[in-house]
Image: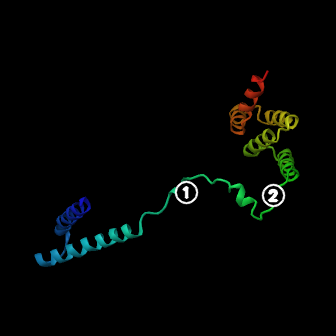
Amino acid sequence: MIWLILCILAIIAALYLTMPLLPAKTQAQKIQISLFITLFIGANLGTYRLIGAPELSNISKPQTPPPPAILQAGQPQVTPEQITAMVEGLAARLADEPEDPAGWTQLIRSRIVLGDIPALIQDHRTMTDIYKNRPEILAKISQDSGFNTFAEQVVQQP
């Protein structure tokens, strides 16, 4: 019911605003042109109402990994050896091209997840040497990779 009232008010407002702007010679022509413009606008709004607004919820949602049932439905599983090889490949790439904060973040996070503490310590020392003159990058890598949280947990253990 409220939509009907709003539509009628919108039509009256459109007619009132467009009539003085029309180049028609007679009042009847002005009314016809105003009605045409109003109906045109109404048809566009009606089409939009029928089609609906674009779905933006898919854009803003972060992508989640597929559930394990989908992974087991025929797709090959990644073995621990393959994961270790990928992490070592990342470490080798960073040894050649050390100016990659995102790469260091991922490497430190991977070492924490794998539980490879000696390599984690060595990689963190290397990363610290590279970014020693840029403490803001060093702090961001340590925070984003989870190294700070991991270090706090290690210190709190008896």
Q: Is residue 155 above or below residue 146?
A: above
Residue at the farthest top position: 158
Q: Which residue lies under the disc numbered 1?
A: 59
**Which one is in front, 142 or 50?**
50
Left or right, residue 67 beside residue 20:
right
Q: Are marks 1 and 2 in contact (CB under 8 Å)?
A: no
Residue at the farthest left position: 27
User: Could you say which disc has been placed on residue 77 in the image?
Assistant: 2
Sooner in the amino-acid sequence: mark 1 or mark 2: 1
In the structure shown, which secondary structural element does the residue marked by tag 1 occupy? helix
Residue 48 location (% of width, % of height): 38, 68
**In the picture, which quadrant includes the C terminus?**
top right
Left or right, residue 69 beside residue 88:
left
Q: Quadrant of residue 39?
A: bottom left
Residue 90 location (% of width, % of height): 82, 48
**In the picture, which quadrant includes the N terminus?**
bottom left
Q: Amino acid at mark 2?
A: Gln
**Which one is in front, 25 or 66?**
66
**Which one is in front, 41 or 8?**
8
Residue 95 location (% of width, % of height): 86, 44
Mark 2 crowdedness (10 Å alpha carbons): few <14, some 14-19, many ≥20:
few
Rounded to the nearest angstrom, the CA distance separating label 1 from label 2 is: 28 Å
Q: Is residue 85 above or below residue 130?
A: below
In the structure shown, which secondary structural element does the residue marked by tag 2 occupy? loop
Residue occupying the point 20% across, 76% down: 33
Q: Quadrant of residue 114?
A: top right
Residue occupying the point 20% across, 64% down: 8
Q: Amino acid at mark 1?
A: Ile
Mark 1 crowdedness (10 Å alpha carbons): few <14, some 14-19, many ≥20:
few
Residue 85 location (% of width, % of height): 87, 51
